[in-house]
Image: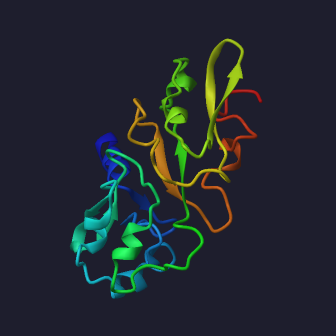
């Protein structure tokens, strides 16, 4: 079971709420973030977006469609994939690249009393901060509004405790109890 969950994390899969279907994360600004069927209809699977990706976060997935993976690095949000597409599979005029952010799991080392700030050191947006606490390692807190969903924190986490998650439009991907204003770990007092 752990291997399966880790595979979904590494290959950018998410479970669509209420449907139980596992769908891959698609490139930023792709139509898939609002309508997977429209993306599948428009994408010719030519690999132009994959070849144009300087970070190498786009890979050919099942059915030949491009998939996003944070296994080695994060997305630079450079828009090269958008420029390379000639099929109209991207919403080039969209303000946001996706509705993606990250969440910390209970495997997070500071929650287990181990000092670790690796994710915060790799977050260019400054969306991960650490709250000091008496008698323990500072806990990470995500500013969901600042998180770009780039995934740079995912592959550097030594515990594999950071998961990319899809969020509803205009909302945090995290339950209220995990937001920066509340404890990350429910047993902690604010």
Q: Position of residue 12 (x, y in %)?
A: 37, 56
What's the residue at 63%, 23% (across, down)? 138
Nearest to the observer: residue 188 or residue 63: 63
Place residue 42 in its image quadrant: bottom left
Q: Position of residue 74 (x, y in %)?
A: 41, 49
Place residue 22 in its image quadrant: bottom left
Would you say 75 lies left or right of 187 here?
Answer: left
Would you say 99 lies left or right of 35 here?
Answer: right
Can residue 21 be seen here? no
Quarter of the picture holding the C terminus: top right
Question: In the rendered view, would you say 96 is above or below 73?
Answer: below
Nearest to the observer: residue 166 or residue 120: 120
Q: How is the image coloured?
A: rainbow
What's the residue at 58%, 61% (across, down)? 167
Would you say 42 lies left or right of 101 here?
Answer: left
Nearest to the observer: residue 32 or residue 88: 88
Q: Position of residue 6 (x, y in %)?
A: 34, 44
What's the residue at 53%, 27% (across, down)? 117
């Amino acid at each position: 079971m752990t291997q399966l969950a880790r595979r979904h994390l590494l290959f950018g899969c998410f479970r669509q709420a209420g449907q139980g279907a596992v769908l891959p994360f698609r490139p930023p600004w792709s139509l898939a973030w609002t309508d997977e069927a429209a993306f599948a209809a428009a994408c010719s699977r030519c690999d132009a977006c994959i070849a144009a990706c300087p970070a190498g976060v786009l890979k050919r997935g099942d059915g030949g469609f491009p998939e996003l993976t944070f296994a080695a690095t994060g997305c630079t949000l450079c828009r090269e994939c958008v420029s390379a597409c000639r099929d109209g599979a991207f919403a080039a005029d969209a303000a946001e690249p996706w509705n993606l952010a990250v969440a910390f799991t209970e495997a997070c080392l500071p929650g287990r009393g181990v000092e670790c700030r690796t994710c915060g050191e790799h977050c260019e947006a400054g969306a991960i901060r650490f709250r000091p606490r008496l008698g323990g390692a500072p806990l990470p807190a995500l500013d969901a509004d600042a998180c770009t969903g780039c995934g740079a924190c995912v592959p550097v986490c030594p515990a594999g405790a950071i998961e990319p998650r899809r969020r509803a439009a205009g909302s945090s991907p995290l339950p209220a109890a995990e937001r920066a204003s509340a404890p990350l770990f429910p047993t902690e007092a604010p």
